[in-house]
Amino acid sequence: MASPCLHRYALLVAACTLCLVVAGALVTSNEAGLSVPDWPLSYGKLMPEMTGGILYEHGHRMVATTVGVLTIILAIWLWRADQRPWMRRLGWGALAAVVAQGILGGMTVIFLLPKPVSISHACLAQLFFSTTVAIAVFTSPAWREGAPPVADTTGLRLLAFAVPGTLFLQVALGAAFRHKALALAPHVLGAVLATVVVLSASHQVLRRFPDHRPLRTSMLAVLAATMTQIFLGIAAFMARVATADAPQPMPVMVVWTVAHVAVGSLALASSIVFGIQVLRYVKPARVGYAIT
Amino acid sequence: MSKKFVLVILLVPVLFLAGCGGGTEAKKETSAAPAASAPAAVSADAGSITGKVAFSGAKPVIRSISMDATPACARQHSTPPKSEEVVLNSNGTLKNVFVWLKAGVPDREFPAPSSPVVLDQHTCVYQPHVIGVVIGQEIEIRNSDDTNHNVHPLPKINREWNESQAPKSDPKRKTFPREEVMIAVKCNVHPWMRSYIGVVRHPYFGITGDDGTFTIKDVPPGEYTVEAWHEKYGVMETKITVAPKESKTADFDFKG
């Protein structure tokens, strides 16, 4: 089983990955995506002059490199210290994801931001962050201690897929809007759908299992992130409208938009953790099954 | 192996992996090659079109540019420079309007002028803000600043490219092979930097200056559609007939 040190290290990797998501959002919001026209080097160097958009683009690459190295260490640590075969595979899977993410990032530069690649880069970033959060959860003492199972009498296990599925769809629609592949309307409709699904799940879980810690905690995390995300989405949109005629990206728009992207990552990651907790603890109802 | 081939090979697993790719924007490849070739001699009957581009809308708020993120840019200005998206002249006219003969010009090849059009990156703005070239005519791109720029045209018909240009380095010489009005050019290092290039298959175009007027010279007799393009206010059209040796007037009035 995982050591406390490994758990703390997994938390560090997840925190650094969130910083990487923020760094990537800063690149897009500051329209700095192609301020460094070459890859993997920047202006043919390891460290170019950090001025204007180069600060955001090369800064993003530096954070990404750091996260890549941290992920290599995490994968090796899991392989050597964790006895669960699926955890070892998850560590290698995270490493594969961060490598794929680096290649996608390079493709966005070389091929001048093709929309499918840019959107895939944004989506995979969110999935990779969720993976690091999941690894942190799987290595935690709370996961090791566990909790009693509960019986599903109303199709609650479906929520394990509906909540993260809806939130991932919403993340993808947001990325498509941000990279000008779709209008705003699908993202707004996605927000309505995600809110309905999250509120419905919260109502069921918090009413039926108010004392079940893993379910309650993960559900509250999804609920809090989703409600915050609605507020941030409105703020980001209003800031974008208010600064539409500005000659350059304005700080008010950048701050709200980057916060919207970051909390979107937290919402998706918490929803995936919620789904995992539901699948772990909510068991299909059978005749004679004792409801706890 | 070409870039497009590599893109296709890499893209397939990528889309499966992320499952959220958007539609690829197909590049329109329209041929601008004229049906027949002929020397571009000026006809003895040629006339001209002059005009003025007025603005009668509500006076827009002209925003200042913050160059603080790049000290090499900021120190070249004693006060923050204004955005050139809309430049209102003192006589109520608009600067930087590209006026060209959109239709009616005979379908023949016009040789590109041998002299290049200069687009300079100076004081961290593109100078001039709007230029026009004939297909195949060279654009000489200079960097007169003490900082790196990257030059990134965003065409929809021609090929997109993105290249860095070191301070005071040798000029780049570029051409565009297809007609396109207009091509935005931006610098991703300095997001306020924006310029526009009109690429036309003939030499019949003009750009309004500090007095809001334009002149299109050596226009053969004929019926034409004249289009005026402005970065913020869009396009206006008018039809005009030029008789032999006639000087015609085509005025425009953007309402904002």
Image (spheres, rainbow, N blue to C red):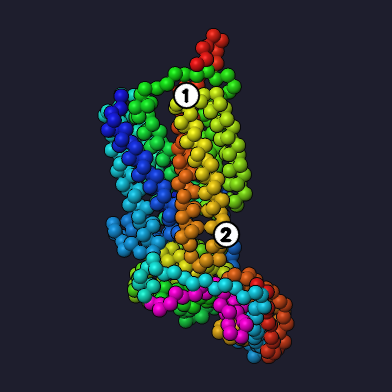
Residue named by callout 2: A241
Q: Is residue B90 magenta?
A: yes
Image coords of residue A31 (percent x, y)? 46, 59
B10 or A199: nearer the viewer = A199
Q: Chain of mark 1?
A: A
Q: Secondary structure at mark 2?
A: helix
**Separation of disc 1 and disc 2 at Cα?**
44 Å
Residue shown at the point (45%, 37%) measured from the top left: A269
Q: Residues within 10 Å of mark 2 (few under 14, many from 20)?
A: few
Q: Amino acid at mark 2?
A: Val
Image coords of residue A232 (percent x, y)? 52, 49
Residue extending farthest top: A288
Q: Chain of mark 2?
A: A
Q: Main secondary structure of the magenta part?
A: loop
Q: Amino acid at mark 1?
A: His
Residue B239 figure quarter: bottom right
Q: Is residue B217 magenta?
A: no
Q: Residues within 10 Å of mark 1 (few under 14, many from 20)?
A: some
A255 or A100: nearer the viewer = A255
Left or right? Give the position of A1 relative to A289: left
Q: Which mark is residue A69?
A: none
Residue named by callout 1: A212
Provide the residue span drawn in magenta.
Answer: B76-99
- In the figure, A96 relative to B195: above or below? above
Residue shown at the point (51%, 44%) measured from the top left: A228
Q: Is residue A111 visible?
A: no
Residue shown at the point (31%, 63%) measured from the top left: A49
A239 or B104: nearer the viewer = A239
